[in-house]
Image (cartoon, helix red, strand yellow):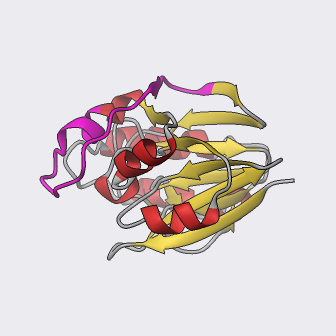
């Protein structure tokens, strides 16, 4: 049974998640000023997982890695954003330990994890599936999708990602990078409309 804690961080209210199973914790998208909240809410953290490389999702990577001596996992296409601060936001640089390529399934402690690649918002933009839960980063939100007008965004790739999302057969709870939870089935009802606006 998974336990999930959520806290919006920073001025962008970026959701940081702690996912716990059998006394092991995963930290997903530790954003701006996430460190203290994470420290107060974990007992045995084993890894940091980033859905993508934007600064508001990775800001506290370095502090938490140094504090707990745990690895950082990030989609390969966005690894450069952790190292180089391409948006000039002053993001503390962090070094990913594992760069995930494409769709990838692996075991991490007590967790079976699936990264699914949905580029468009960023080159590496991915969702993270753990059991019946999807941590969607900035790919899909409740009644919306991630923007594609940033540097390194790609509208054509986002269209392909939307079409891929529409093929999902399994309904899951979606925990997005911003805003409230939703479900795969709810978002499949309307996400196709975005194909006309990208």
In the image, residue 139 lies at what x, y percent?
Answer: 48, 52
Q: Quadrant of residue 113?
A: top right
- Where residue 67 appears, as percent x and y from the top left, is 45, 48
Q: Position of residue 86 (x, y in %)?
A: 16, 44
Q: Is residue 121 visible?
A: no
Considering only vertical position in the picture, is 189 above or below 98?
below
Please tell me which residue lies in front, 149 or 33.
Answer: 33
Residue 191 in the magenta stretch? The answer is: no
Q: Which residues are magenta?
A: 80-104
Task: Choose top left, top right, bottom left or bottom right for residue 143.
Answer: bottom right
Q: Name the foreground residue: 113 vs 162.
A: 113
Residue 23 position, x and y percent, is 78, 49
Q: Nearer the viewer, residue 51 or 190?
A: 51
Identified at 31% across, 40% down, the residue is: 94
Residue at figure coordinates x 35%, y 30% from the top left: 77
Q: Residue furthest right?
A: 1
**168 or 151: nearer the eye?**
151
Q: Is residue 34 above or below residue 152?
A: below
Question: Residue 142 lies in what quarter of the image?
Answer: bottom right
- Report the residue at 32% width, 51% height from top: 54
Q: Residue at x 54, y 62 (%)?
A: 38
- Whether residue 54 is situated above or below residue 173 in the rendered picture: above
| 95 left or right, relative to 20 | left
């Amino acid at each position: 049974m998974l336990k999930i804690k959520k806290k919006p961080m920073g001025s962008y209210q970026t959701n940081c998640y702690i996912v716990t199973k059998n006394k092991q914790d995963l930290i997903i998208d530790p954003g701006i000023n996430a460190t203290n909240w994470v420290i107060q809410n974990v007992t045995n953290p084993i890894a940091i997982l980033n859905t993508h490389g934007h600064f508001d999702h990775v800001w506290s990577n370095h502090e938490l890695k140094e504090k707990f001596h745990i690895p950082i996992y990030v989609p390969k296409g966005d690894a450069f954003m952790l190292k180089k601060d391409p948006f000039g936001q002053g993001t503390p640089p962090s070094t990913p330990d594992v760069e995930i390529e494409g769709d990838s399934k692996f075991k991490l402690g007590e967790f079976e994890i699936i990264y699914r690649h949905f580029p468009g918002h960023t080159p590496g933009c991915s969702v993270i599936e753990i059991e019946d839960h999807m941590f969607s980063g900035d790919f899909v939100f409740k009644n919306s999708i991630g923007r594609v007008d940033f540097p390194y965004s790609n509208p054509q790739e986002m269209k392909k990602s939307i079409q891929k999302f529409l093929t999902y057969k399994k309904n899951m709870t979606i925990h997005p990078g911003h805003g409230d939870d939703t479900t795969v089935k709810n978002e499949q009802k309307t996400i196709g409309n975005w194909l006309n606006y990208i």
